[in-house]
Image (spheres, rainbow, N blue to C red):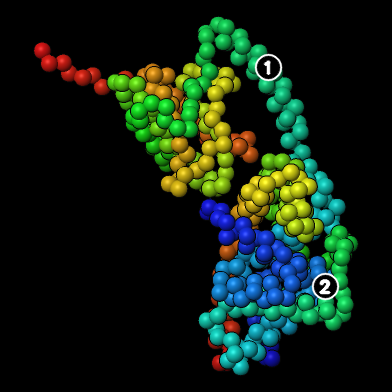
Amino acid sequence: MSARRESFANALIRNYPGLTTLLQRHAGDLQLAKDILHDAVITTLTKLDAGTLSASEDIAGYVFRTALNHLRTHRRGERLRIGDNAAVDELASDTASPEDQSQSDANTRAVRRVLHGLGSLRDREVLVRFYLDEESKQDICAALGLDEFGFNRVIFRARERLRRLLENIGMGRADLLTLVAIVSLLTLVRYS
Amino acid sequence: MAMTLSDTDRFERLSRYLSGQLNDADAAKFEGDWARNPGWTAELELDARFQAGLGELRRRGQLETAMRGPWWVKSLRVLAMAASVAGIGIALWTWQLAGHAGGLPLTTTATLMLGDSVAVMRLRGASPVSGVLELPAEPRSIELRVMPDVSQALSGDAYSMSLAATNTDASTVASTLKELAIGKDGFIRAYVDSRNLKAGRYRITLRREDSREADEFLILVSSPAAIPHAD
């Protein structure tokens, strides 16, 4: 792969801070997460080159799916099963670049603001149990005395607020627009 | 953006997919649906960022603090309780002095034949009056259609609304209609019996139920138009 394409691959990776952290969370290591994502980008570029993937397809989604498939393969191969999410969260991201760290800080601040914006402790607990502890909707509703509508309402509103906050700090739609631009450039690079 | 059933189902499938809780067949089906819906990528990234932010708060040992909510909420609650006690005292005193000066009863449906419908909204750079109503000659239910601040409003939000004459102390407004939803046209609706209104200025207070901030709108109520008599 040329240096130019490598730099495009790296630029593409930077547009998936959420996915990167998710991979880190499940793989247990930031560098491994980046490697998995990098491999996913390379797989995508290779398929674009081979013509088995059309440039008109959802390239961003394809990278995302491929990365998660690589993660599954890795977990099966290594028999790495992380059962204790809290322990994974304890893993320090010391190897994060300043740019990654700044993005992570902004994201964390936005999530904290979403938590603070929720009206009750119960609503905040719904989010933590659902997103962080990965409990099922049924379990959460039973534990917190919520019906399905109430649960959905909390999740929907919290997501909408996070989306707005991220957009306000330039981490929302702007990223995706950048992504579209990068994908367009990538298709040009294929022929360079 | 309104929440739909398909949205809420998707949130759960999406979350279970991200956390590896779907079996291979369900994961493959999810990926097939995803390939047909490119917009899901942004949704997945959003959920992943939610997880990332919460995970980072836990890693930094800040999750418990964040779970307790903003520090000022407790202080505010104490102040609010003190203010409530004081408010109740003042309200009782005012009640005794001037009779029932509190807010006017609003309803979610028309209780009489429907009269005028007043659209109340903030108009940029315009007069402070957000709506004008001419009282009907006969008793009618007046429909108040109030548009909340669109930059703050979410279609799933619940609102409370009260109506009072502007010379009424806000703390004495007792009748508040709660759990009002924004309609498809962006307005929140409530009804008032025209017999409870007199010519003058009224204040509509609209508050998102999970927020401390309120929108206030001024409406002008005028007497019924004089009907010319035939001599």
Residue B37 visible in the snapshot:
yes
Q: What residue did someone put label 2 on?
A: A27
Quadrant where the N terminus of chain A sits is: bottom right
Q: Which mark is residue A6?
A: none
The percent coordinates of residue A104 (x first, y second) are 74, 62
Image quadrant in which you'd find residue B207: top right
Label 1 neighbourhood size at 10 Å, few (<14), some (14-19), many (20+)?
few
> Mark 2 — on which chain does it sit?
A
Near-viewer residue (A87 or A11): A87
Image quadrant in which you'd find residue B89: top right
Element carrying mark 2 = helix
| Disc 1 and disc 2 in contact, CB within 8 angstroms | no
Residue A165 visible in the snapshot:
no
The three-letter amino acid code for the residue at tag 2 is Ala
- Residue at figure coordinates x 57%, y 19% from the top left: B172
Quadrant where the C terminus of chain A sits is: bottom right
Q: CA distance from mark 1 to mark 2?
A: 57 Å
The percent coordinates of residue A180 (x first, y second) are 56, 74
On screen, residue A75 versus residue A131, left or right, reads right
The three-letter amino acid code for the residue at tag 1 is Ala
